[in-house]
Image (tube, grey):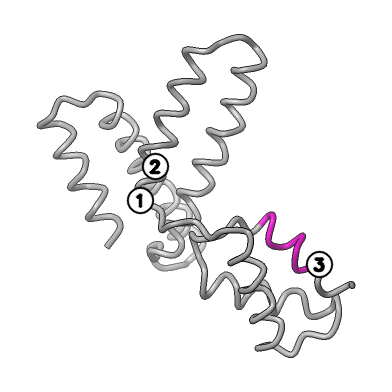
Amino acid sequence: MLRDDINNAVKEAMKAKDERKLSTLRMVNSTIKNADIDARGNGKPPLSDADLLAVLQKMIKQRQEAVELYDKGGRAELAAQEREEIAVISAYLPKQMTDDEVKKAIADAIAETGAAGMKDMGKVIAVLRAKYAGQMDFGKASGLVKAALSG
């Protein structure tokens, strides 16, 4: 399980005295615990690995936005710190799909669902989320699905 991998990495980072990795992994654990508590409050079970991948992707996206802001503000040291955190978190995500792989997956999902128009977009996205959680950027994918279904 992903949680076990992260917890084992925390122990390894402690032994190696890798402060950046340790602090990043502790932050990841904290975010996961908060998401679990939030899910429990809504009457849901603890997060699955697919849900955890979504949490990690969100954390990476937040850091990418911070890097942009730090670069614009001339804060190179803070941007570098965020990039290091992105590298640590990314290690727990599956390999990201290329643009061509994403387009093929969308075409396959459209064929599988028999989607004919924009009203079927939700079905296509649901199939993609089920099969490719953590492997594609669903923000970009939804735009590509919209283009494929409308044109």
Distance from label 1 to label 3 (Cα)?
29 Å
How packed mark 2 is, by other alpha carbons closer than 10 Å (few <14, some 14-19, many 20 or more), is some
Q: Residue furthest top?
A: 74
Q: Residue at x 46, y 20 (%)?
A: 80
Q: Residue furthest right?
A: 151
Percent coordinates x, y for residue 13 in the rendering: 18, 34
Magenta span: 139-147
| Quarter of the figure with residue 52 | bottom left
Amino acid type at mark 2:
Ile
Distance from label 2 to label 3 (Cα)?
30 Å
Q: Residue at x 38, y 63 (%)?
A: 49
Q: Circles 1 and 2: CB distance less than 8 Å? A: yes
Amino acid type at mark 3:
Lys
How packed mark 1 is, by other alpha carbons closer than 10 Å (few <14, some 14-19, many 20 or more), is some
Amino acid type at mark 1:
Tyr
Q: Which corner quadrant holds the C terminus?
A: bottom right
- Of the image marks 2 and 3, the number of the one nearer the N terminus: 2
- State the residue position of label 2: 89
Which label number is shown at residue 146? 3
